[in-house]
Image (spheres, rainbow, N blue to C red):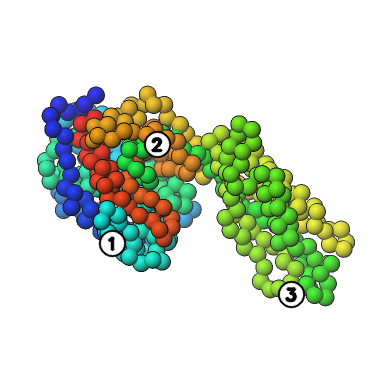
Amino acid sequence: MSALDSGELPDVDRKAAVDLVLEMMAVPGKSGDEAQVAALIRRKLRAAGIKKTAVVEDRVPRKSPLNGECGNLIVKVPGTVRGPRRLLMAHIDTVPLCVGSRPVRRGNVITSRDPHTALGADDRAGASVILNAILEIRRQRLPHPPLTLFWPVQEEIGLYGVRYASIGKLGRPNLCFNWDGGSAYHVTIGATGDYNMEIEIDGIASHAGARPEQGVSAIAVAGLAIADLVSNGWHGLVIKGANVGTSNIGYVNAGEATNVVTPHLTLHAEVRSHDPRFRERLLKEFRRAFEKAAQAVKNDEGRPAGVRFSSELRYESFRLSEKQPCVKTAISAVQAIGLDPIVQIANGGLDANWLSARGLPTVTLGCGQRHAHTVNEELHVDDYLNACRLGLLLATGHT
């Protein structure tokens, strides 16, 4: 399967790789505000001899509901040996909790020095794996097949970067590899699908002390609906026979004063499942619970609340065959560096969801993050360095 017939496998400069990820994680860049980290990547590429005109930015901000400071970064590197084009990708945005991160290494673990911020290893570690690969290729003058380096934006808020990416700019890659959470030996070949919901409840305002009976509390309606979902097993981890999914009510906006029966409430929630039909069932149960609760709460004139319900597919589930060329190549690479691959399915969304849905089957590899989206986030250095070794092997076509 080797694209190159050279005996010894290339290796990475471990100190340079760790210094790179420390620098990357310290740069603020929550979803929509990725311009600073994109500029850093551009500077590193230029210093390595990549022409300025080779670094392309697409028009995601014109399509994304978030808009944003910049689009996805795409670099197409001509091959020095023949072979199918390979795409290496990892998103560059972080969750807001990572803004202000001051990464510090303590032995084999990197954490944020500030206990009030997350680290940002999700997914600056993955972004560093890809950047490190091209920097090593240039530094060591390694032969390689045609490459596309892809750094998407706006992953954390709904995979918008890949969803709205200019696929034509990627150069029709044959093998696509994504780096995100988990250990380097994790080979993720599928992920769940996700619907977002917005539920609006229109109650009736009244004075909460003088005339509470004239009002209809939107908060009371929401409370009944949520209790219904919880008591009937439709909230949290949902297992109904052979069907499995999850649901979560993320945040609620309602009310301004204690002396007013709250007339309006907006609630945001999500449902997930690998099975599209069961995901639709979860949506229906949410709708049923809120419509039933709205009819149950009435004022003294018998007027109930109203409910408006909308949903959006954030990303569809997918599952690759282990016979897919990208999967087989990824497994071979993990084995080549002496690790035992674990093939798995993810319960979270990945950029691979949308890239696979748009005709580019993509396998995801881990790069050492733990406890992402929390102040306890860590990057395990050995895992990260193994991911860098994998990135270099896959970029140079050794597997």
Tell me where residue 297 appears, x and y as whole percent: 80, 57
Amino acid type, label 1: Val
Residue 75 visible at all: no
Amino acid type, label 2: Thr
Q: Could you say which is closer to the camera, residue 247 or residue 135?
A: 247
- Give me the residue at 31% from left, 31% from top: 331
Of label 1 and label 2, which has the lower sequence position? Answer: 1
Tell me where residue 355 appears, x and y as whole percent: 41, 38
Q: Residue furthest front?
A: 107
Secondary-structure class at tag 2:
strand
Q: Which residue is mark 3?
A: 259
Q: Quadrant of the N terminus?
A: top left
Q: Which residue is mark 2?
A: 188
Mark 2 crowd level (few <14, some 14–19, many ≥20, 10 Å Cα):
many
Of label 2 and label 3, which has the lower sequence position? Answer: 2
Could you say which quadrant of the image residue 376 lies in? bottom left
Secondary-structure class at tag 3:
loop
Amino acid type, label 3: Asn
Tell me where residue 39 appears, x and y as whole percent: 27, 57
Q: Nearer the viewer, mark 1 or mark 2?
A: 1
Residue 15 visible at all: yes
Q: Quadrant of the C terminus?
A: top left
- Give me the residue at 61% from left, 31% from top: 242
Tell me: 317 left or right of 261. left
Mark 3 crowd level (few <14, some 14–19, many ≥20, 10 Å Cα):
few
- Give me the residue at 15% from left, 26% from top: 5
- Give me the residue at 18% from left, 44% from top: 12
Q: Which residue is mark 1?
A: 104
The Cα atoms of the two marked residues, 1 and 2, are separated by 29 Å
